[in-house]
Amino acid sequence: MRRTPAHLARHGGDHPNDRTREQGTVRRTVLGLAVVVAAALAGSAAAASLSDDPPPDVEAMLREEIEAMIAAGVPEDHPKVESLREDLRAMERSHDTDAPAEPGVDLGARVDTARERVAAGASGTGGWDRGEVLCEPVPGLLTIDDVADAVCVSAPQPDGTNRYVAIGPDEVAHVVTFDDEGEVARLADRSVPGPIVPGETSVTPTADGDLQITPPGRPPAVADLP
Amino acid sequence: MHPTRYALLALAGLLIGIAVGCHKHPSFTTRSYYMANASRDEAVLLGCANGDKQGRLTLFFGAPKAVGSGYGATLWGASDRTAAQIGTLVKDFVRGYVYCRESRSHRLLIGVGTSNSAVDGKSDTWLTTHGARWSKMVRDVHDWAATHYPTAASIYGAWDAEPSWSRYAKASAWMHGYDNAYPRRRNLHANFSADGCPQTTADNGACNNGWTQWHLWHLAWDHDPSLTFPQIYATSGANARQWKQISEYGHHHQGDGIHFFGVLAQSAACMQVGGCAGTDNTPHESHDQLFDALDSHSHTRQGSIDAMTDVRWHS
């Protein structure tokens, strides 16, 4: 029987060469993974830098769209293909065309005027609606269920913002606020005095930006808006 | 390890990196807007602010509505506008863009959009007429742009149609009105949702509110003006799968699969309103989800999806 060499006995049976081989395997694995990761990072950076090159123009995009549709089997004389081709031809011709300026329009002056008026607060939003309005979803804020069977009101606020309010038969007001700087948000629902009957319950904004609610056959009541 | 093996590993890594890192140039990711502001000055400045962009986008106005004695749309809380007034706002946007664009080679393809919300209570005749008036307004604004700013902007229609928002028959009535202006009518960005549509089957399955895959295919693709440009919001990939199945349905049952012209995301609007959990794909995520879904089968595969846009509120 082969006796275990003394150095193996001291190290629990492992041969130093075995440990060396195992450590070498680990090193090679780690190195291999590092190569893959480094190359992946390099590839990603290369792709990103390619995307920083000037992009293809819109005419190239239209050509691609037309070619792709035809390659997918859309007939060349299909109205969709023909209309896009017409657009492309018009774009190509436009480079050789001296387009007449709009009579009486100085684009630079128009932009400057717009900047001045907006900065001075003289431009506003073009006006907020006041009173009952069409009930419709507000994308991302009021769903079709929120406005179902509702009475909807636009209620300008003393601070210049606006509230779009949908009040359902459950006498809960769903409120969205708009301002003139791109701020749009859903505010907390609140209960209002009812009953709310579309076409019969009158809902009007007050000067303070709240709602006066007048159900059929009942005295008006004021509902505070957030 | 043999040097050849290291080289092969490096090549594999490089390919992985390129694939993961590949995306469209930033200027092609446009900004679309929910137009909740009726100020002409603001429209000019909005166009100017987009001078760094080129490609397809949509200016979304609200629901179709009678405005005065005419046809128009809501602007949510802002005052309703007639179709002609909306056309004027779009012209102001173009004027600002033309003045401020960073390169004379930059060009916007602008969809002027309404929706199918709040239309169930309207007669088919009214809706057909509204569609026709919208089509005329889009054509008029395009002709104006083609005359004065032909290198800068082309104008299209656009439509945010969603199954949950109306019965199919009412949406169809509007589309017939828009389409019947052929050959004078412009193409239309079909910025549709596919609420409730199947994600794994393509046999004319049911979507929300009585719509079917056929209804979505027909309005968003089959109608000649429609350039399919759907909402791909869901981070789960659900919307991408829904549209892949609608295209698959078209291929198998109508002999006509869909070519997708772009994707619509809403990540910017989500940030404005404080978040939309699960529906805040970035434009690149929207693009990649739809591209990968279509790429999963030879019947729906397409070489590229060229337009990416991210909608936000303009108030």
Image: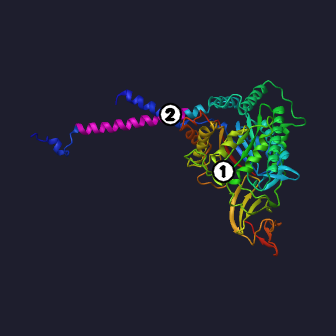
Q: Which residues are magenta?
A: A17-46
Q: CA distance from mark 1 to mark 2?
A: 48 Å
| Label number found at residue B211 | 1
Q: Is residue A222 found inside the magenta-colored segment of the image?
A: no
Q: Position of residue A102 (x, y in %)?
A: 87, 34
Q: Are marks 1 and 2 in contact (CB under 8 Å)?
A: no
Please state which amino acid type lies under the numbered disc 1.
Trp
Give left or right: position of A59 versus B135.
Answer: left
Residue at 81% x, 32% y is B146
Disc 1 versus disc 2: nearer the observer:
1
Chain of the residue under the numbered disc 2 shown in the image: A
Residue at 76% x, 61% y is A163
Q: Position of residue B241 (x, y in %)?
A: 57, 45
Q: Is residue A26 found inside the magenta-colored segment of the image?
A: yes
Chain of the residue under the numbered disc 1 shown in the image: B
* Quadrant of the frame with the N terminus of chain A: top left
Q: Position of residue B112 (x, y in %)?
A: 76, 43
Crowding near the residue tagged with mark 2, few <14, some 14–19, many ≥20 C-alpha atoms within 10 Å = many
Give left or right: position of B56 versus A30.
Answer: right
Is residue B197 among the parts visible in the rendering?
Answer: yes
Residue A21 or residue A67, whichever sits in front = A67
* Dominant secondary-structure state across the stretch colored magenta: helix
**Which residue is denoted by mark 2 in the rendering?**
A42
Which image quadrant is residue B54 in?
top right
